[in-house]
């Protein structure tokens, strides 16, 4: 009997244990299945982008990772004491958070894994992935610290990935040399996989490209290991390699590399772009006829596209800048706009076409001015047009050299010093800001300072050269004189009234300072303001009101656009002086006002003394009676 019960209990316990095992297997089986499905989606997604950093999971992929987290969490809830099962569940949760780009939660789970399962087989993977998540979470210093055990051991399964991540961290810390050293270590190690070496070459090339080291960038972009990368990375490497040659001004070789890219079936979508670049590099190499053949091929095979618009723009630019055939250039620019009006090159073409049309008009006007035989040429209009043409060349047509030629023409042939100074400064500025030729710009700035001292152009030239500004224009000197005169006026206004002799003397000194300032600098802002202060001084003395009026008239008539001219006009409109006729009219108005007040006062007292009329009580009919229906009503409505 006892033995039978024992057997029954044993079988029941085995049954329970079997059910528990089945539950674990069910949860983990589903979690791993969903994880594999999400991994397939992730692999397909990453095949279409050059870098994982540029891509994030879609909704279906994210939902599968959420299910993985859910199933793994059930394992943690039901089997908290089973170390093997919980380790696998925590690892899957951490990996799912990482693939979902939820970096903080992934870091937390990786930390939890290291704390409780450091002796597990997946710990080596956790070391690297935690450092990577810290990097993506912008915690660069902590990421570097977490990466130390990975890069310290060459036998670490993630050693080469660790070196690549270390290079990224060095790049973020603005230490490209250290990043390059880390990637060079990957290439130097013979045990690295071809794929990792290809990634290292790709990253190294990008770093050298940013540093404008075109030779080394070109070398790494053409490394044989690049062939192991995906299509997008190989395409980028090929394009950047050709651009390195363009930056080296080796245009024909660059065109050859674009031709090789054009032949690759995997890059078929980029073929029109490669054709345009082949044409542009061929044009830069001086083979104009061949370039135009290529551009026309683009216009024929890909009409009304961004690429045809760009091709027409290049053809127009050549006719404008090299041949100087502005009419043909405008035709090409029109074709560029018609091909694809909303694209970037179409907008540039429209702007250039309009600028060229304006330039041709200005040029024809100047030609007419010079060819007039019956009258003296209007050189003022001529040089004004030259400035407009120079501005069009510089700002609208991107031809700084042509702008300088026009400005030089003004400098050499104009008899107007103001025009010469303006053109000389503009020429120096073009060399400084547009042609990036600081040596020539400095020579021209110093020439301005020497030839035209104490002018605004000399003053600005000193500032542009970073020199201490010592030049003072007429306006600057007048302003200093005004401040001195103003201080005398302030001293006079603050003197006590009981010292009237000293007050008069102080105001007289201030008046003299303002008067001399106006005489020396009548056309400066400070001089006009000094004239206004003279009028104020005269206005303070009743016997000098006529002089004040004359000055106010002068300010209003000659300097009406200045603040002091406008103030003078206001003072004159409010009648600074009062004549006998004005006083007589004022007396008449006062008498009429008094008469009206007396009439109103008499009427008021009459109404006040009159007997009030007896008012009869109003009779309210029963129909009109309104009873108060409130809580405090005195009526009893019951």
Image (cartoon, helix red, strand yellow):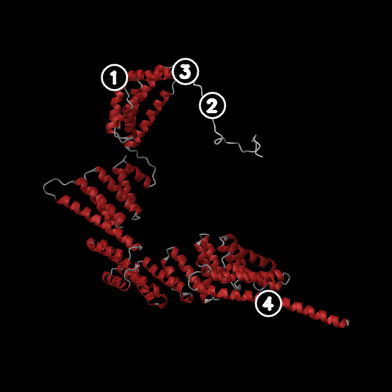
Which residue is label 4 attached to? 25
Report the disc number at residue 617: 2
Separation of residues labelled 4 and 2 (CA atoms) = 103 Å
Q: Position of residue 86 (x, y in %)?
A: 69, 71
Separation of residues labelled 2 and 1 (CA atoms) = 62 Å
Left or right: 140 with respect to 235?
Answer: right
Is residue 532 visible in the rendered image? The answer is yes
Q: Position of residue 579 (x, y in %)?
A: 30, 20
Q: Residue furthest right?
A: 1
Q: Within the image, what quadrant is residue 94 found in?
A: bottom right
Separation of residues labelled 3 and 4 (CA atoms) = 113 Å
Left or right: 321 with respect to 24?
Answer: left
Check disc 3: other Cα within 10 Å, few if <14, some if 14-19, many if 20+. Answer: few
- Image depth: mark 2 or mark 3 in front: 2
Q: Residue furthest front?
A: 622
Q: Earlier in the sequence, mark 3 or mark 4?
A: 4
Q: Earlier in the sequence, mark 2 or mark 1?
A: 1
Which residue is label 1 attached to? 581
Q: Earlier in the sequence, mark 4 or mark 1?
A: 4
Residues at discs 4 and 2 in contact (Cβ within 8 Å): no
Q: Position of residue 261 (x, y in %)?
A: 39, 74
Q: Within the image, what quadrant is residue 563 found in?
A: top left
Callout 1 secondary element: helix
- Image depth: mark 4 or mark 2 in front: 2
Q: Position of residue 343 (x, y in %)?
A: 35, 63
Residues at discs 2 and 1 in contact (Cβ within 8 Å): no
């Amino acid at each position: 009997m006892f033995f039978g019960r024992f057997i029954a209990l044993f079988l029941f316990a085995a049954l329970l244990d079997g059910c528990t095992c089945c539950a674990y297997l069910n949860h983990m089986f589903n979690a791993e299945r969903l994880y594999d499905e999400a991994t397939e989606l992730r692999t397909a997604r990453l095949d279409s982008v050059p870098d994982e950093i540029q891509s994030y999971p879609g909704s279906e992929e994210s939902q599968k990772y959420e299910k993985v987290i859910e199933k793994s969490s059930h394992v943690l809830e039901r089997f908290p004491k089973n170390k093997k099962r919980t380790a696998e569940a925590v690892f899957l949760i951490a990996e799912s958070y990482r693939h979902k780009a939820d970096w903080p939660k992934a870091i937390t789970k990786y930390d939890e894994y290291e704390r409780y399962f450091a002796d597990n087989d997946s710990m080596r993977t956790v070391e690297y992935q935690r450092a990577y998540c810290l990097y993506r979470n912008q915690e660069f210093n902590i990421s570097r610290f977490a990466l130390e055990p990975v890069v310290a051991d060459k036998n670490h399964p993630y050693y080469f990935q660790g070196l690549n991540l270390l290079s990224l961290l060095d790049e973020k810390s603005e230490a490209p040399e250290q990043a390059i050293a880390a990637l060079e270590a990957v290439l130097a190690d013979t045990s690295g996989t071809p794929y990792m070496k290809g990634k290292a070459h790709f990253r190294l090339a990008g770093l050298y490209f940013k540093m404008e080291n075109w030779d080394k960038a070109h070398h790494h972009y053409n490394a044989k290991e690049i062939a192991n990368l995906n299509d997008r990375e190989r395409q980028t490497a090929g394009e950047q390699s050709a651009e390195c040659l363009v930056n080296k001004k080796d245009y024909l070789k660059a065109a050859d590399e674009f031709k090789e890219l054009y032949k690759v079936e995997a890059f078929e979508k980029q073929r029109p772009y490669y054709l345009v670049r082949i044409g542009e590099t061929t044009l830069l190499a001086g083979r104009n006829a061949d370039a135009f053949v290529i551009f026309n091929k683009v216009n024929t095979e890909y009409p009304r596209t961004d690429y045809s618009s760009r091709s027409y723009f290049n053809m127009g630019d050549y006719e404008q800048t090299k041949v100087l055939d502005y009419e043909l250039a405008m035709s090409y620019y029109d074709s560029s706009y018609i091909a694809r009006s909303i694209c970037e090159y179409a907008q540039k073409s429209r702007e250039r076409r309009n600028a060229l049309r304006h330039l041709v008009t200005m040029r024809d006007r100047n030609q007419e001015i010079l060819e007039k035989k019956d009258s003296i040429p209007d050189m003022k209009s001529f040089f004004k047009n030259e400035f407009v043409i120079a501005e069009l060349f510089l700002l609208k047509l991107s031809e700084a050299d042509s702008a300088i030629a026009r400005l030089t023409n003004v400098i050499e042939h104009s008899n107007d010093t103001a025009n010469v100074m303006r053109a000389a400064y503009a020429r120096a500025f073009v060399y400084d800001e547009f042609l990036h030729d600081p040596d020539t710009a400095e020579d021209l700035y110093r020439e301005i300072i020497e030839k035209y001292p104490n002018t605004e152009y000399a003053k600005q030239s000193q500032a542009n050269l970073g020199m201490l500004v010592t030049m003072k224009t007429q306006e600057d000197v007048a302003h200093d004189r005004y401040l001195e005169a103003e201080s005398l006026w302030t001293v006079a206004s603050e003197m006590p009234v009981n010292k009237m002799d000293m007050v008069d003397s102080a105001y007289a000194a201030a008046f003299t300072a303002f008067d001399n300032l106006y005489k020396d600098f009548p056309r400066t802002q400070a001089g006009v303001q000094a004239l206004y202060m003279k009028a104020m001084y005269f206005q303070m003395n009743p016997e000098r009101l006529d002089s004040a009026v004359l000055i106010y008239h002068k300010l209003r008539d000659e300097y009406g656009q200045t603040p002091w001219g406008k103030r003078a006009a206001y003072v004159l409109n409010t009648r600074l002086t009062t004549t006998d006729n004005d006083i007589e009219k004022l007396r008449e108005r006062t008498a009429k006002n008094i008469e009206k007040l007396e009439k109103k006062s008499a009427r008021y007292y009459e109404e006040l003394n009159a007997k009030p009329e007896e008012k009869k009580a109003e009779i309210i009919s029963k129909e009109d009676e309104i009873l108060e229906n409130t809580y405090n009503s005195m009526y009893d409505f019951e």
